[in-house]
Amino acid sequence: NHKVFVQSFLLTFLAEWGDRSQIATIALAAAKNPYGVTIGGCLGHSLCTGLAVIGGRMLASKISEKSVSFWGGCIFLAFGVHSLFFDSSE
């Protein structure tokens, strides 16, 4: 479906823009062969995304979306509370 393609492309593109892996890829491309970095980065990201899709599909058949949202929210809040009390440089 065309809509799913556009949605997943934009989600991935916007989520990855400016993150640490992109910065590391920029640094690697500055020091090494940029074509090799491009091919390796595309293959690595494709494999990682493919595993996430397959794993998510398998989990969706066993765990409800409501449970995932609830526990994901709890973990997110726990990280937020942790960051209030502990310095990130430790």
Image (cartoon, helix red, strand yellow):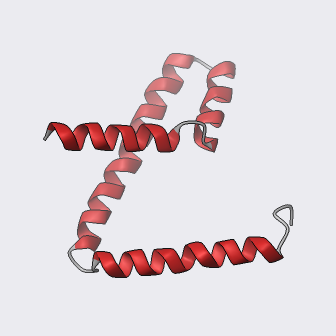
Tell me what residue is drawn at x 71 percent, y 77 percent: 81
Instruction: Give the image location of residue 42, x and y in percent.
Output: 42, 32
Q: How many labels does the image show?
A: 0
Q: Identify the residue at horizontal 32%, vertical 50% (top origin).
A: 50
Point out the image quarter for the C terminus.
bottom right
31 sits to left or right of 19: right
Residue 62 x/y as whole percent: 24, 80
Quarter occupied by the N terminus: top left
Q: In this view, does 49 lie to the left or right of 63?
A: right
In this rendering, the answer to whether 4 lies above or below 88 is above
For this rendering, which residue is in front, 28 or 59?
Answer: 59
Task: Please determine whether, in this image, residue 88 is positioned above or below residue 2.
Answer: below
Question: Farthest left residue?
Answer: 1
Residue 9 image offset from top left, x and y in percent:
34, 38
What residue sits 58% from the left and 35% below the top? Answer: 22
Q: In this view, does 80 lie above or below 19?
A: below
Q: In which quarter of the image is residue 7?
A: top left
Whole-percent x, y for residue 32 in the image: 63, 20
- The answer to which image quadrant residue 87 occupies is bottom right
Q: In this view, does 44 lie above or below 74?
A: above
Q: As drawn, is 68 to the left or to the right of 74? A: left
